[in-house]
């Protein structure tokens, strides 16, 4: 049985489906986590003992990859509204591939950091490097959850459960994926301006 058949169409008092409301709550909590991390970054940097180093150039490449993935997931969403199920599937597959490429790029950013003797922990580490690992790592964790969500919606699309009359799942995954892209853009600009 489909979850949308069990749950009411809209939550009383909010006018929103319960799953959409839960998604918004989750995104607010993730935003608060990253607001706390970036605030701690600024406070700790002002205390001194802060190693200055150039950000790996691959961060720009991963940013472009994630921006492209936002375009593909949006294309999948628009295709679902037009009942073009095959395009939905192609759009979701492209988004998954770009999401995995982003994660591989992030791993390579960490490899670059290690090669430049910027470590997460240990006697040779510095808070500036540790913060970079934490910010990118926690974002990568949330991106993995987004990929799992995408794969669930992709499976639904192969069962013809994603179309103009069943838009909740693809709508939610599109919102969440755009949120992760916007969050990454914030982190990237934050690091460029404050590093």
Image (tube, rainbow, N blue to C red):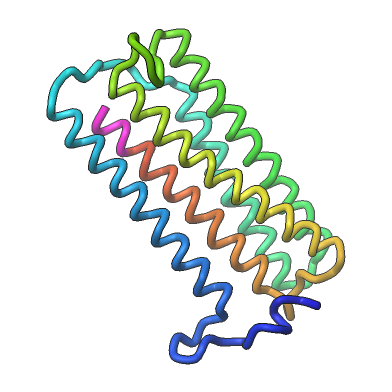
Q: Is residue 26 left or right of residue 163?
A: left
Looking at the rendered structure, the number of numbered marks drawn on it comes to 0
The image quadrant that residue 73 belongs to is bottom right
Q: In terms of secondary structure, what is the magenta stretch mainly? A: helix
Q: Quadrant of the N terminus?
A: bottom right
The image quadrant that residue 153 belongs to is bottom right
The image quadrant that residue 87 belongs to is bottom right
In the displayed orientation, state which residue is furthest to the front: 122
At 37% across and 14% down in the image, what residue appears? 122
Instruction: Indicate yes or no whether the magenta region holds residue 133.
Output: no
At 41% across and 8% down in the image, what residue appears? 116
User: Can you give x and y, in whole percent of width and height, for residue 100 in the image?
Assistant: 65, 37
At 54% across and 62% down in the image, what residue appears? 175
User: Can you give x and y, in whole percent of width and height, for residue 49 in the image?
Assistant: 18, 18
- For the residue pair 74 and 18, the one nearer the viewer reads as 18
User: Can you give x and y, in whole percent of width and height, for residue 35 in the image?
Assistant: 30, 49
User: Can you give x and y, in whole percent of width and height, for residue 109 in the image?
Assistant: 50, 22
Instruction: Indicate yes or no whether the magenta region holds residue 193.
Output: yes
Q: Is residue 47 above or below residue 80?
A: above
Q: Is residue 186 left or right of residue 21?
A: left
Q: The magenta stretch spans which residues?
A: 190-195
- For the residue pair 14 and 63, the one nearer the viewer reads as 14
In the displayed orientation, state which residue is furthest to the bottom: 12
Q: Quadrant of the C terminus?
A: top left
């Amino acid at each position: 049985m489909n979850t949308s058949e069990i749950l009411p169409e809209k939550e009383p008092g909010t006018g929103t489906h319960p799953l959409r409301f839960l998604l918004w709550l989750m995104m607010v909590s993730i935003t608060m986590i990253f607001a706390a991390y970036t605030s701690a970054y600024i406070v700790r940097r002002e205390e001194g003992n802060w190693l200055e180093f150039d950000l790996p150039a691959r961060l720009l490449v991963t940013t472009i990859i994630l921006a492209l993935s936002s375009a593909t997931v949006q294309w999948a969403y628009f295709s679902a509204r037009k009942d073009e199920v095959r395009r939905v599937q192609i759009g979701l597959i492209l988004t998954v591939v770009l999401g995995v490429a982003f994660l591989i790029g992030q791993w390579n950013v960490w490899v670059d950091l290690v090669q430049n003797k910027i470590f997460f922990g240990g006697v040779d580490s510095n808070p500036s490097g540790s913060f970079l690992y934490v910010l990118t790592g926690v974002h990568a964790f949330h991106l993995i959850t987004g990929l799992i969500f995408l794969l669930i919606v992709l499976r639904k699309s192969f069962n013809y459960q994603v179309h103009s009359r069943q838009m909740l799942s693809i709508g939610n995954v599109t919102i969440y994926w755009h949120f992760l892209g916007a969050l990454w853009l914030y982190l990237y600009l934050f690091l460029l301006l404050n590093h």
